[in-house]
Image (cartoon, helix red, strand yellow):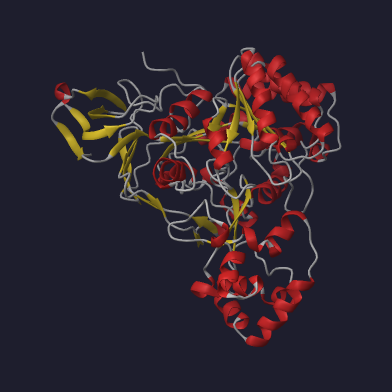
Amino acid sequence: MSDLIIRNGTVVDGTGAPRRTADVAIVDDRIVAVGDVTAFEPADREIDATGLLVTPGWVDIHTHYDGQVTWDPDLAPSSINGVTSIVMGNCGVGFAPARPDRHDWLIRLLEGVEDIPGTALTEGMTWGWESFDEYLDVLDTLEWTVDVGAQVPHAALRTYVMGERGADHESVATPEEIEAMCAMTESAVRNGALGFTTSRTWAHRTSSGESIGTLRATADEVVGVARGLDRAGAGVMQLISDVYQSGDDALVERELDLLGRIVHEVGRPLSFTVQQNDETPTRWRELVDRIEGWSSGGADVRAQVAVRPIGVLLGLAATANPLRRCPTYARLHDLPVAERVAHLADPSTRADIIAEHAEVRVSDFPALIHAGFDRMYPLTDPPNYEPTPDDSVAGLAAAEGVEPIEKMYDLMLADDGAQLLYMPLMNYAAGNLDDVREMILSEHSMFGLSDAGAHCNVISDGTFPTTAITHWTRDRTRGEQIDLEYVVHQQTQRTAAHVGWKDRGVIAPGYLADLNVIDHARLALRPPQLVADLPAGGTRLMQAAQGYVVTIKRGRVTVENGTLTGDRPGRLQRGAQPAPA
């Protein structure tokens, strides 16, 4: 007898093997049979999966739920988009270790770096720890819809050991401070941390504008702290650097030298962010070539890549807004959206703002957000993540014979001010996803960068796993698609194995019963919507999906037809998990 049998589904088992029709039997939290399940009949429940896909649950190794896990057991949108295991603590930011007098600073850091409302963190965070080991102990008492793994973030570790100096990116850690950080990392990994992460990008700043303290940490510091992984004999390292987006060849070479030292002196699995930006559109190929060189020497190095553009969402209710720099609009900005729409619809107000918009002078990303009309696309239902020039605000304006600013203004007022504009910033230099497809297919790449739990009011990329299935295996028309078996493998067994979770990501006897039953023909994302469900009334973008018939975590149904069931079998995962015997 079994707890659950999934009947007659098209099993895509996560290994990359060809799909096949099979039954799957589950007892307790494990898969016990695939194919012939007669030994486990009858079952407490059966799910008819005829015509449906049966896949492992998605394993998202790049999230930022570090604070949210303390108050939110559901962890959406990940949980409602087929994800059954998440890894947090990425990019060197998180909330442990944390001295009591650094709580406010850590909140400001996450508010700035990851656009998580500080008021929500202040009200929602439970704290109750100081060391990272104590943080894990607190997490061990909690339950979620998904399994959770945590990494040691360099920025929090640095300020814990160095105090105020640790928050200053110009401060140089002493050998004694480096050894203290290394020892704490070793201890955390021995107690169940999955690894150590750091950030070296100018884009990461506190909410008050200061650069993240790890920005210019010396190579000796980074390698010295990371040696804690080697001393523990476990753990992975993850980082983000300006190496993929900088036009400064000298800086790029310094960062590559640092990565090489990590590869050769630390010797643990390493992954880092690889994207494409407009200024250095071929830099990512240089990085993949360098990874190939390290890998040929036996190193375990991966490029973390995205499955669609990294794009911001613009709108009246969003953080980013093309009208924000216009003085007339700025005076209206703090009004409720409905009141703003009423004012903005007034012809004289409209004329003033449009005139002011033309006078604003900004550069870089702010310039794109202000007036990048050829990179602004009205968000459709379902969202189109590979739009054409004709789909842009500029393209629509040309077709209608109006100025782009006029068209953008109209769109901002559409749907009572709820309309969002999609602006791809990374991975769209050529105006299509051909280069992203090349990244995805590299043997040195790994799906990541969803940032689920972060960028609450400006980016909605926690739904990457659903896009990977819908766009790349079914919907893409502007170029070649990708085999379903490959895509499923990339976000199940491959991601799980990288962090040492060898007990999941595969549909076979003995593996965790983490599964999705999917109506592939009906699978689709809905447009993101701003919801005010964070503590202190904080808002975030929530993006639901249709077509996930059920999501199963440890043998228990957590989501059914897009609705959370309230069952929360997810637990903290301390360190690597062994493969089934």
The x, y position of residue 566, in whole percent, is 35, 47
Is residue 538 visible to us here? no
Residue 162 higher or lower than 455, as above or below: above
Q: Nearer the viewer, residue 134 or 505?
A: 505
Is residue 15 visible to us here? yes
The x, y position of residue 299, in whole percent, is 62, 16
Q: Nearer the viewer, residue 437 or 99?
A: 437
Residue 500 higher or lower than 371, as above or below: above
68 relative to 288 in the view: left or right: left
The x, y position of residue 406, in whole percent, is 63, 75
306 relative to 383 in the view: left or right: right
The x, y position of residue 511, in whole percent, is 35, 23
- Picture residue at 30% right of the left edge, 33% below the top: 555
- Picture residue at 80% right of the left edge, 32% below the top: 217
Image quadrant occupied by the C terminus: top left
Quadrant for residue 338, please give it.
bottom right
Q: Which of 231 and 474 is in front in this view?
A: 474
136 relative to 508 in the view: left or right: right
Quadrant for residue 6, please give it.
top left
- Picture residue at 60% right of the left edge, 14% below the top: 233
Image quadrant occupied by the N terminus: top left
